[in-house]
Image: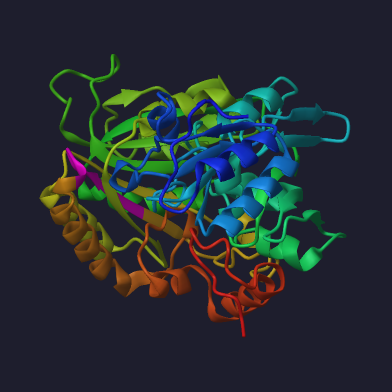
Amino acid sequence: MTLDASPAPTASVTQAAIRDLAASFGGLVLVPSHPEFDATAAVHQLANSGRPALIVRPCDAVDVATAIAFARRSGLEIAVRGGGHSVAGHSTGDGVLVIDMRDLRELTVDPVARRLRAGAGLTAGDVVAAAHEHGMTIPFGDVASVGIAGITLGGGIGYLSRKHGMTVDHLVSVELVTADGRVVTASATSEPELFWALRGGGGNFGVAASFEYHLVDAGMVYGGALVLPATRDVLRGITPLAGAAPDGLGVIANYMPAPPAPFMPQNVVGQPVVILIGVFAGDLAVGEAAWAPFRALATPIADLVGPMPYPAIYRANEGASTPMPSVNRTILLEVVDDMVVEALSDAYAAAPGVQTLIQIRVLGGAMAEVPSDATAFAHRRAPVLVMALTAAATPDDLGPCVAWAEALLDRLRLRGIGTYANFLEDEGEARIREAYPARTHRRLAAVKAAWDPDNVFHRNQNIRPAG
């Protein structure tokens, strides 16, 4: 159905075509003249907000197939929106048809079989909260409002990666709508090559309607936020400590201005600090011991680390859900040595944005134990992920931010060994090749040729069809 009785035609779509779509569509069809259109079109990355031609909100996989067929007939590009967090702006665009998945909210938990099925419109926070009722979870990232589809299809790196591996390591099956309108199930036993590609290859192969995951234990954890002074000694000491810690401990170091939080001393607010956010999943006494070396790095400015229910860790990053125009660059590193520490410190001091974050994630553990060719995410043995972001007041002010981010990336390349597709902006073919080693990229291109030979789904970190 449509939310506007008098839909305005777009450059390539007539009123009659929109009415026909609405008549055959179980969900919502929104046109630009509707008063709720702009709010529905909003995404997290304001630098790439775009102005869609049409937004559809399917209620099931059949609706998704209908939308794909309509877009192909009408010559419209397809953008797929889950949580709207695409840093590259792929979930929207000027003149595109947005397939907005937010109404696909199926969620069932089988605690005996340790399985969870979730619709593609759910967020990580939705799913983690439901699983926590049974003392279990799925290893997602570090922001609750991120859509499960984007993080899953790109790989999924978060607090539990060292303990339980990546999100894709717990994926059991995907219900996928293909470019030709078929609804298929990809799993280890059904379309296994497609299933391999979906575990890290992004949205290249179709529109995911639902996911089935294997659950892991995560009730009470020992975690929270530890605020340390942003000295080079602290920055230098984090990665060796995190790498040597028990695999149950996953921490993310955030080099950033101290926020005006109740726990932050007033004289520190706005000054650079390092906020370690993470959890130890396992015995709480072991967790307390695992955090001790970090507390010894320097006198803590604030210490909010202790026993907590696992979902509470997401409160530490609630600010990451605030839409803003920003630029980020991401790189996987072989080491964080003096050169890297100097580069990060220099970059932070010279950041042109109104808000800056440099994030260091120490990887390894269970994530590295999976063979590099088991999933389309192949950088399994990368020790460290660094992401640097700076935000501008308006999209028009992003020029200096881009220059800053590129300059830092150029310095870090001396220690670089790849990148992570989920954190890439629209940075070109060479950067996509950094996310997928040559052998992986060739295999992905072959899967793309089999399932989307016309490259219908290209608003992503695009893998062109082989041939």
Direction from residue 229 to residue 164 in the image, left or right: right
The residue drawn where x is 30% and y is 17% is: 263
* Residue 392 on the magenta segment: yes
Give the percent coordinates (x, y) of residue 213.
74, 42
When asked about the image quadrant of residue 194, the answer is: bottom right
Direction from residue 432 to residue 209 in the image, left or right: right
Direction from residue 191 to residue 47 in the image, left or right: left
- Between 274 and 2, which is closer to the camera in this rendering? 2
Number of numbered markers: 0
- Between 433 and 2, which is closer to the camera in this rendering? 2
* Residue 376 on the magenta segment: no
Q: Which residues are magenta?
A: 387-395
- Between 207 and 136, which is closer to the camera in this rendering? 207
Of all residues, the one furthest to the front in this rendering is 16
When asked about the image quadrant of residue 330, the answer is: bottom left
Classify 132 as above or below 336. above
Tell me how the rendering is colored.
rainbow
Of the 4 image quadrants, the one containing the N terminus is top right
Give the percent coordinates (x, y) of residue 225.
40, 29
State whether residue 225 appears in this view. Answer: no
Give the percent coordinates (x, y) of residue 152.
61, 48
Classify 246 as above or below 455. above
The residue drawn where x is 52% and y is 29% is: 288
Give the percent coordinates (x, y) of residue 100.
55, 39
